[in-house]
Each structure stands twice: as C-alpha cells, then as structure tokens.
Amino acid sequence: MTYIQLAYGDLFLPALLVVMDGVLSLVLRLKLEKQLAIATVRMVLQLVLVGYALTFLFAAVSPLWTALAAFIMVLFASREIVARQKRRLPGTWSYGLGAGCTLLAAGTVTMFALLTELRPDPWYHPRYALPLLGMILGNTMTGISLGLDVLTNGLVRERAAVEACLALGGTRYQALLPVLRDAMRSGLMPTINSMAAIGLVSLPGMMTGQILAGVEPIDAVKYQLLVMFLIAGGTGLGTLAAVMGGARLLTDQRHRLRLDRIPAETST
Amino acid sequence: MLPIGCSLSFDTMLTVSVLKRLHISVSFDLQDGECVALQGPSGAGKTLLLRSIADLDPNDGTVKLDGTLREAMPAPVWRKQVTYLAAEPGWWSDTVQEHFGEWDDALPLVTRLGLPPGCGPWPIQRLSTGERQRLGLARALMLRSRVLLLDEPTSALDSASAAAVESLIAERISNGTSVVWSTHDDAQARRVGSRIFVMSADGRIEENGP
C-alpha cells in the first residue's frame, strides 16, 4: 500500500478556498463570515486533536482508554440528539434515552462486527473499534433523533386519535401504533435512501479514503458493504429502542397519554 | 352481570368520591340505568371530570364500579366498561369502517343515527363535524359499556339528529346503562337527566332537581 503523504504546508492552498468563501460572504453580505471562521477553527482543532488522540490510543491499545473514548463519542452523540428535538422528552430522560439507545445499538453492532467478522487482535483494538463505532454512531444518531422527533410531534398532532383509541379500551401500544410506525419509518428512511443511492450518486467517504490510501477498489467496496450493513442494523435497533422508550415515557401504567411530560417549549 | 328485572332496587353502580383533578373536586353516586345531566359554564371542568372518571388523566380519588376499585383492573378494561366519548372524537385510520371491529354489526346503529348504510368506505376527511360526532357515538356504543360519559354528544347536530341520539341513549338507559351527559342545552338537560348536576367555576358540583 502506497499513498501520497500530506504535510501541513500542503494544506495551505486548499485552505485558501475557505478564505474565498469568507470573501464571498463579505462581498455578498451573507453575514456568514463569523460562523464560517468559528466553524473552520473548530474543524481544524477538533480533527488535529482527534488525530493525536487516535495516535495515542493506537499506541496504547488499552481496553480502558478505548472504552473511555467510545463513551465520550456516545455522550456527544446523545447531546446532538437532544439538540435536534423540537419538543424534548422530560428532564434527564432526554439525554438518558438518546445515550442509552445509541450505546445499545451502535455498541452491539460494533461488537458484533469485531467479534465475528473483523476479529482484530486484540478484539478491542482501537484502530478498528473506534472508526467503526464512529461511523455507526453517526447514522444511528440520525435515525434516533428523527424517530423521536416524529414520535413527539406525531403524538401532539394525533392526540385526539390516540385518546379516542384509549377511551375505547385500547392499550397504550395499540393506541400509539400508527404514530410508532411513522416514527420508525422516518428513522430508517435516510439509511434506506443512502443505500439506494450509494455508488451511483455518492462515493462514500470511507471508501474514497481507503482508495486514496492505496487499497484496491474492490477491497474498499467490501469494507464499505460491511459498514453499510452495520449501519442499517444499528439504525434499526437504535430507532426501535428509542421510539419504544419514548412511547413508554409519554404514556403511563394506567395507559394514559402523558403529553404533560413534554416540557413547555422554551421560546428562544 | 346485569341485574334482571330488579327495577325497584336502586343499585349503586358508579361511585365517585373526592375525585380531584386540577381545580375540580367532585363526589357523587350513579345508579343502574340512571342518566345524570352535567351542566355548567365553559371552562368549569366538565370535560376534566368526565376524562378523570375514565382515568384518561392523572387524578386522585376513589372511583368504583359495582364496588370494585378501578385500580383493581387494567385501565383498558375499566374504559371498556366506563367509556368516555369526546365532543370531537378522534380517528386513527383513513376510512370509517376501519374504526369498527365488525362494520356489519355497527350498521343498525349507524343507520339509526341517520347516516347512509354505504358510508363504511368513506374517508374520514370527507365527513362533516356532525357525521363524525354521530359515528363516534356509534363506535363507542358498540362496546356496550356499563357507564357512558358523554361530552356534549349533540353539540354539532341538528335537532332531528339530536333527537335520534337522545332516543337511542334513552333505550340504552332503560336497559340498565348509566350515563353522565354533559350539555349546554338546558332543555336537553331536563329531557335526558333524572338529576342535574351543575358545575361551578370553582370545580364543585351541586345537584339541581330536574
């Protein structure tokens, strides 16, 4: 495997493209220059830090440090899930449910891949575990946040229908079923769409990266297929768990719809 | 078990004692085959009271059916016997007949309420408010509940349809069903209720003779 190595200096010219965006923003008065600057600085800092962190982790190959890194990734994912909700779940549950479901789904699927197919030595080797987890996490997170968003909005909108079913002696799961189905569908849709378009419309980042690094295209494709299967599984599991958990939080033991548990929207 | 032929015994069917929900606090008893009209200004809490009896909202207090606490049974079982019907009933499927277990069994009720027998495949979207209200009633009556909690069941109906609803419910009452009927119409309250409860803005009820 040979690949063309980049020095920091090689990034100077490409970085000018971002400066060009900034000039455009100034000239056209898009008022994006501040956001653009902050985002650029964040991107550079975050990626360089991650680079050093991964270098350290790969050298250490410690189960403890790898687990800590995975845990921090899950935390950021759950924060992102909460930030994407229009109506939030009650209290700490909004974080707990997001974190629990991403951890459960992405964790299970990553372990599954590591233990059955990739089998690195040791199995928790961060070189395999962390990139896999990262890719699955990102997609699972999208599925969960979409699913929860459709669930809470759907329950608010379909409140009369849900309560009509409850009043007629339906259980909370019978009453919520139409909304649960909608939520599951929207959670899975992005993954299905990207699976359908992959290769034709988009070349996935991981595969392109491997090809640039000198891997034979057909080998890169196999890796990409593995990752896509894992993503599909993780998104399905995670969305199911989050939507069921959300449904449980917004109903109670006496089969009542508890929209009062959604905190009033903060007008910001 | 429906008591057969014991028209003289006033069995207490539904007992509500110190039912509290937000500002309302209510106690009353309902006999077998009795209809109580519930009146009071908008916002007094009539809907809150009916929903609380059906256990659709969190509430405090004791509610019993034939001496059995509602907490002693799963909430869906309770609501099949003590059924709340909203003034604007909700719909969870696209067509009328999907909301009924057996549409053919519901036809006699549906036609009696003045709806065409062919309305089964109609989309819910196409129904007028009054049609929805009558179909919602038919759907609830299919359960053959012991107690009906009717929230302004004729608010969207013309007088002919309202009369059809009143006579249908009267029939159920004479067969032993108990009813709490919330209405803004004083004449209707006197027609349907053997007793009239008036709810005041402070969330209490007072009994007025019919």
Image (cartoon, coloured by chain):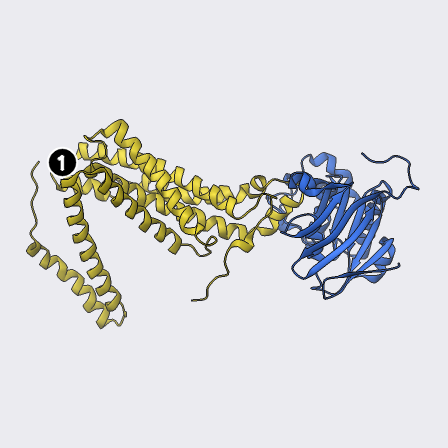
Chain colours: A yellow, B blue
Query: Where's the N terminus of chain A, which quadrant?
Result: top left
Residue at point 53% right, 48% down? A250
Label 1 sits on a secondary structure element that is loop
Q: Chain of mark 1?
A: A
Please state the horizontal and vertical placement of residue A158, each as a whole percent of the image: 56, 50
Q: Residue furthest top?
A: A116
Q: Is residue B174 left or right of residue B150?
A: right
Task: Tell me what residue is drawn at x 41 percent, y 44 percent.
Answer: A187
* Front-lying residue, A174 or B200: B200
Q: Is residue A189 visible?
A: no
**Residue A10 lies in what quarter of the image?**
bottom left
Q: Residue at x 51, y 45 (%)?
A: A247
Nearest the camera: A83 or B104? A83
Q: How many marks?
A: 1
Residue B184 is situated, as x and y percent measured from the top left of the image, at 77, 61
Q: Toward which corner of the image does residue B107 lie, by quadrant?
A: top right
Q: x and y percent of residue A43 in the render?
A: 21, 56
Image quadrant in which the C terminus of chain A is located = bottom left
Q: Residues within 10 Å of mark 1 (few under 14, many from 20)?
A: some
Tell me the kind of residue under disc 1: Val
A69 relative position to A92: left or right: left
Q: Find residue A118 and report its image quarter.
A: top left
- Residue B58 lies, in percent from the top left, at 62, 51
Q: Which residue in the structure is indicated by mark 1? A: A215
Q: Is residue B185 visible?
A: yes
Instruction: Return the residue found at the far right.
Output: B8
